[in-house]
Amino acid sequence: MSVRTLATAALLVAALAAGAHAAAPPFAPIDVFALQWADNPVLSPDGRKLVYERQFFDTMKDVRRSNLWLVDSATGAAQPLTTGSVSDGQAAWSPDATRIAYVSSDEGKAQIFVRWLSSGATARITQLERGPSNLAWSPDGRQLAYTAFVPSEGKPLATLPAAPKGAEWAPPVTLIEHTVYRADGAGYLDPGFTHVFVVDADGGAPRQLTRGEFNVFGAPAWSSDGASLYLSANKDADGDFEPLESELYRVALATGDLTRLTTRVGPDQSPRLSPDGKRLAYLGFDDHGLSYANTRLYVLELASGKARGLSEALDAGINSAEWIDDRSIAIAYDRRGATHVAKVALANGRSTTLAEDLSGTGIGRPYTGGAMSASGGRIAYTQGTPLRPADVAVIGSDGKPKRLTDLGHGLLDQRTLGRVEEINFPSSFDQRQIQGWVVYPPDFDAARRYPLLLEIHGGPFAAYGPHFAPETQLYAAQGYVVLYLNPRGSTSYGAEFANLIHQNYPSEDYNDLMDGVDAVIARGSIDKDNLFVTGGSGGGLLTAWIVGKTTRFRAAVVAKPVINWFSHALTADGYNYYWRYWHKGLPWEQPDYYFKHSPISLVGNVVTPTMVIVGDADMRTPIAESEQYYQALRLKRVPSAMVRIPGASHNIGRRPSQMLAQVLNTAAWFERYRKRVAAEQGTP
């Protein structure tokens, strides 16, 4: 063999070895369709098993789906309960743990099914016109309670003459006389109310238990003797004008009679009966008309009717609460961008943190969130990390979390993801500490310079945190250092911090965001001539506010924004809420206030190339908000564009292709205006 042949062979071996150890590719747009994650884990009554929803995207139908999986709480051994391309969810265990009820679609309509675990047999037990929710088994396992919408019968205001046979007249008019008449994601609503029903667990005709012109909220809870149900409702005559109000009631199964259990101004909701049947745990707060209030944990003694708070010492809003046993309650709450699981003692309200990584179900951007249940002395929850969407974890008697699934293994272990790093800095306005996170490109090299993308959360009463997010990873994979922050007004930092923007939004949250940009630039590796900004909903509002106040960004993308508080207050689906809790009064009473806090007031200053993205079925921040901003930019001759996403509601990411449409169009707009510098300067 010649020396040249040996050299060639050596090079080939070296190349193969290098290929074997080459870095995995970065997260790519098509990878979104391959993601799988866990949601809604529900423990069996004895805590030995759990069932959870395994979420995934249907590539062919471009929708989110879910199947149910059964897991052994001790070993993690798992098996599918349902399969296929329909969505199965809302699982509920029978009291003896022999059956699981759940909701699934059958011929396009959601129905209740029951699965017998010993035989594997499944039966559909309802034939409903309207989809059921909030399943709850009776203590004897013979009945299921659920909630469903009941349409109201309306009469036309006027009657047209009969059309001639074969005539093609226009469709009849729609008469609207109710205050809440449309909702984002649902469109225009049929008149009616949500009520409680019961149905035999073996099937049969359902029986409507509550009636009247009021809504029941959330899941009902059975009394220990099975003779009544506890529920949350707002029975006030003007309930539509009190959007936060609700009380707890007991409804008798035999008669449907309602007995009121709470009497304060503010919401009382999510009743949960203690294992011994003596107490109700529930969530709520006193309504003082503030933009934000911490949701508290309460316990109602059923014998005396007296209630007491258990979470006053915790300056945080409680997301959910479940009884662990008769002496303790599991709660989930947000703290500094992370969602905690804690155990609260019934005797004194003392809380013990058990986990700080409940996460991972808000696929899209890095919002807090997740799901939890407790039973049989165990707690199950969705556990996530900055580099992993939700898996299922269980906390046992030792108080330590144990992860039972690894749903990201097949995809994410084969990708190089952007490193996520926490950042903290003082606000230049008042020196308050502001927290955020930086996502670096997968091939980040501190010696090079990178464009910076500021991504702003919506809400505004929400929080980002150290959670997996396809959108930020996709931006990082395209070479951007991504910064996301929790400026004042964000939740998880206490009620006072959130209410810094009460009737003052936007305001100094602008300073917090600009300080964050400066803090990342000060670390180095950022090309100061290539700064970009985007955000959705409240983040879209702040993006429009930013380009009206500074020219430091090369381009901006304003997604589904509020641009004019006056028009938003009278066109958004929650119009009965915003004027009362976010603003100083009705818009015609305070026109100067509304204009002062509207980004449209600053549009005359804008020179930054700005694109607007909005779903054309958005009813939360209606498309007119985006259109008036786009038209104002065009009149100013600012380089601008508008992307309308057909059929998308405010939740653009509900369909995976539309999530990608927002991300990729945003990146393309930025690339159009990105300043290119010489290669020797080290720009990627």
Image: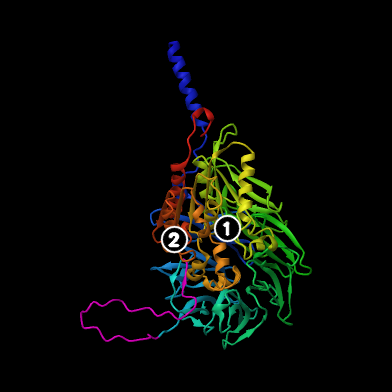
Residue 499: tell me if it is visible.
yes
Residue drawn at x 51%, y 52% is: 605
Q: Amino acid at mark 1?
A: Val
Going from the N terminus, do you reach mark 1 or mark 2 first?
Answer: 1
Badge 2 is on which residue?
628
Q: Position of residue 134 (x, y in %)?
A: 54, 71
Give the tally of numbered discs. Answer: 2
Residue drawn at x 56%, y 84% is: 237
User: Residue 71 got which mark?
Assistant: 1
- Residue 86 magenta: no
Q: Position of residue 597 (x, y in %)?
A: 57, 62
Of residues 173 and 207, which is closer to you in this image? Answer: 173
Magenta stretch: dominant secondary structure: loop
Q: Amino acid at mark 2?
A: Gln
Which part of the image, by quadrant, shows the N terminus?
top left
**Residue extent of the magenta highlight:** 155-184
Of residues 684 and 66, which is closer to you in this image? Answer: 684
Q: Is residue 369 left or right of residue 398?
A: left
Q: Position of residue 623 (x, y in %)?
A: 44, 62
Of residues 53 and 521, which is closer to you in this image? Answer: 521
Secondary structure of the residue carrying tag 2 is helix
User: Residue 392 got which mark?
Assistant: none
Label 1 environment density (alpha carbons within 10 Å; few <14, some 14–19, many ≥20): many
Q: Is residue 151 left or right of residue 216?
A: left
